[in-house]
Image (tube, rainbow, N blue to C red):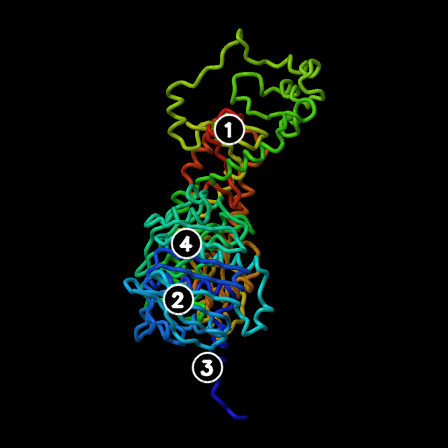
């Protein structure tokens, strides 16, 4: 076997396979170069999902003829000193432009600010042309045509043009969130125009441009620090969630990353607050000394490695949970909109004669008798709410004749006293006015009404009380008549014994039983009969990965959530007004009461303006 030196073109094509996986990868590298050049305006144009054309125009510092000649050579960069421990730019490897030029038709036109003219250089399938004068505005224009024409096999792995165009859009969105002071424009024959005007220091305004205006009303600001790591950003309230994790954005020292550890920390922070299959919306920005994070893990630079991953994870989980406890009882503002949309499709005044399916009170309204002074709570009155066969005809109205309703001659309904009005205004969830269908509490607020799911709300309250019992003191445990011996690798036993004291606080007492085994003497009483060996092995695996013992906490909280569900106020139970108001007051004082243990909302708020729109009054 004879060893030989590979050609420069083949070397670049091999490198391109790692750096440029798809058109979106090329777009990411070119946008990063524009940002590093100090651009305040970046325009991206595509055709054919970026495979036919990808053009990036910026108003950055620009390059002269000599710089252009070096820019298309491998490992030539203006962003790196003599060390990899102080990287403060997005790009630094010097591989993007030569990699693109080796598999596509690349043209770079640039003009430094203050220069009288510009220059241009082309690279086609690895063949470099001469630098020549060219007309150009200050800044740089990079045009990539026929991506992967030099490596046709790669084209077979490309997705549809629509999918590739969508991936480029996602890259632009991530860059736009990271750099709100830059104006981004995305256009092309394969898409509609997308523009993100610069918002300066107003980061939330830029996020709202990307994630939608609803995020502004449902976001909780984050600002926390631990040792040398700073966390800022915004986390959505738990009831403001999505069907996938595409609305989770993470940045490390301004660099957009898709780090599994950060995404895992976000999931952990929202545990027990979001339904299975739903994902929170969050934008997190971590700032730390560049020496404490390695961004040179992969040529694509989307993965990072922290020197202290446990510190970062703990910071993210703690900051989000504290913020949710502070403001997480807020209901999503989109709940009222969804409720109004649910009303409108069924409401059709033109449909047949009379009540539509949505408007027909096919079941009696079960209102707590003590909520009103009148006769709507009686069984005789409820029977009058049977479905009418002929709408507003005279015969159909006979059933309503027996109802005791206020008239001009009857005793008038007393308006709330000034003291009652003041009381309503002082409570965010208002004062209870009725119980509907023996499960939903209707409360009046100062500017609208709130509908509460009594079972879901009380379930959350009980769970939070049980969760408090898990902290501060050793949990009750049950001793095993015969200790259970669990065989494990010696290194797993060492890790478990390192956390033995913390596990004992949770009710799990373990001892070393020889070099390759653990003896379990006590287990948490809350868990009852359990697969002790399976639990210990899961803990060993988790400690090996994260060096934490959160799995046991998660199991205990799951048990607490199940017990809370069975111990809460059941659907169908009639509540007195005092009980309903007590439940509302507890919800206002309990963090995270805006959603139940399964992540569903516990209440929906309708502003008076929403109700007026429902009736066409505004």
If you read the primary sequence from the N terminus, does the residue marked by circle 1 or circle 4 appear first?
A: 4
- Kindly identify which residue carries mark 1: 613
Foreground of the two, 21 or 508: 21
Which residue: 59% across, 26% down? 366
Q: Where is residue 19 in the image (x, y as percent from the top left)?
A: 47, 70
Mark whose residue sits in front, 3 or 1: 3
Residue 556 vs residue 130: left or right? Answer: right
Q: Is mark 1 on a helix, strand or loop?
A: helix
Mark whose residue sits in front, 2 or 4: 2
Residue 284 placement: quadrant? bottom left
Numbered tag placed on residue 536 in the rendering? none
- Kindly identify which residue carries mark 3: 8
Whether residue 458 is visible to the viewer of this picture, yes or no, is no
Numbered tag placed on residue 184 in the rendering? 4
Quarter the N terminus occupies: bottom right
- Kindly identify which residue carries mark 2: 109
If you read the primary sequence from the N terminus, does the residue marked by circle 2 or circle 4 appear first?
A: 2
Foreground of the two, 327 or 257: 257
Residue 586 placement: quadrant? top left
Q: What element carries label 3?
A: helix
CA–CA distance between discs 3 and 1? 68 Å
Mark whose residue sits in front, 3 or 2: 2
Foreground of the two, 121 or 85: 121
Residue 308 vs residue 611: left or right? Answer: left
CA–CA distance between discs 2 and 1? 55 Å
CA–CA distance between discs 3 and 2? 23 Å
């Amino acid at each position: 076997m004879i060893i030989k030196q590979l050609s420069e073109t083949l070397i670049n094509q091999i490198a391109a396979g790692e750096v440029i996986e798809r058109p979106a990868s090329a777009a990411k590298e070119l946008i990063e170069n524009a940002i590093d050049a100090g651009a305040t305006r970046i325009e991206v144009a595509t055709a054919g999902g970026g495979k036919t054309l990808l053009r990036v125009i910026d108003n950055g510092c620009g390059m002269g003829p000599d710089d252009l000649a070096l820019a298309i050579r491998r490992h030539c960069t203006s962003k790196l000193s003599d060390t990899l421990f102080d990287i403060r730019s997005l790009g630094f490897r010097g591989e993007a432009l030569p990699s693109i030029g080796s598999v596509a038709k690349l043209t770079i036109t640039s003009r430094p600010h203050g220069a009288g003219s510009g220059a241009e250089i082309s690279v086609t399938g690895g063949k470099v042309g001469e630098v020549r004068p060219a007309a150009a505005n200050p800044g740089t224009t990079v045009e990539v045509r026929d991506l992967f024409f030099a490596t046709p096999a790669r084209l077979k792995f490309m997705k549809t043009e629509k999918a590739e165009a969508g991936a480029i859009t996602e890259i632009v969105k991530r860059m736009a969130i990271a750099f709100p002071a830059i104006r981004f424009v995305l256009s092309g024959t394969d898409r509609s125009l997308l523009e993100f005007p610069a918002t300066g220091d107003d980061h939330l305004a830029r996020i709202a441009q990307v994630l939608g205006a609803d995020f502004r009303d449902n976001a909780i600001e984050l600002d926390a620090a631990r040792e040398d790591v700073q966390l800022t950003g915004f986390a959505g309230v738990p009831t403001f969630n999505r069907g996938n994790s595409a609305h989770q954005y993470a940045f490390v020292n301004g660099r957009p990353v898709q780090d599994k550890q950060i995404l895992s920390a976000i999931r952990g922070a929202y545990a027990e607050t979001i339904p299975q299959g739903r994902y929170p919306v969050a934008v997190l920005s971590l700032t730390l000394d560049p020496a404490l994070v390695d961004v040179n893990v992969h040529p694509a630079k989307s993965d990072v490695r922290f020197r202290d991953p446990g510190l970062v994870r703990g910071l993210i989980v703690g900051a989000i949970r504290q913020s949710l406890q502070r403001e997480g009882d807020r209901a999503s503002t989109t709940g009222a909109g969804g409720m109004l949309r649910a009303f409108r499709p069924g409401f059709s005044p033109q449909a047949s004669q009379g009540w539509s399916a949505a408007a027909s009170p096919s079941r009696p309204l079960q209102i707590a008798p003590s909520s009103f002074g009148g006769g709507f709570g009686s069984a005789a009155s409820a029977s009058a709410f049977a479905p009418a066969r002929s709408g507003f005809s005279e015969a159909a109205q006979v059933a309503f004749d027996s109802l005791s309703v206020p008239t001009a001659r009857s005793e008038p309904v007393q308006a709330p006293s000034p003291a009652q009005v003041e009381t309503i205004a002082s409570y965010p969830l208002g004062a209870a006015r009725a119980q509907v269908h023996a499960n939903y509490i209707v409360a009046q607020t100062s500017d609208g009404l709130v509908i509460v799911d009594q079972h879901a709300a009380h379930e959350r309250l009980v769970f939070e009380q049980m969760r408090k019992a898990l902290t501060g003191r050793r949990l009750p445990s049950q001793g095993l008549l015969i200790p259970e011996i669990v065989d494990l690798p010696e290194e797993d036993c060492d890790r478990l014994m390192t956390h033995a004291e913390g596990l004992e606080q949770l009710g799990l007492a373990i001892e070393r039983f020889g070099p390759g085994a653990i003896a379990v003497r006590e287990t948490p009483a809350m868990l009852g009969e359990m697969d002790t060996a399976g639990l210990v092995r899961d803990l060993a695996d988790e400690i090996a990965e994260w060096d934490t013992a959160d799995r046991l906490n998660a199991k205990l909280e799951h048990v607490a959530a199940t017990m809370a569900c069975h111990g809460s106020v059941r659907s169908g139970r009639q509540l007195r007004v005092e009980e309903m108001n007590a439940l509302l007051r507890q919800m206002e004082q309990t963090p995270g009461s805006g959603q139940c243990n399964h992540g569903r909302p516990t209440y929906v708020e309708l502003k008076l303006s929403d109700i007026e729109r429902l009736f066409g009054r505004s």
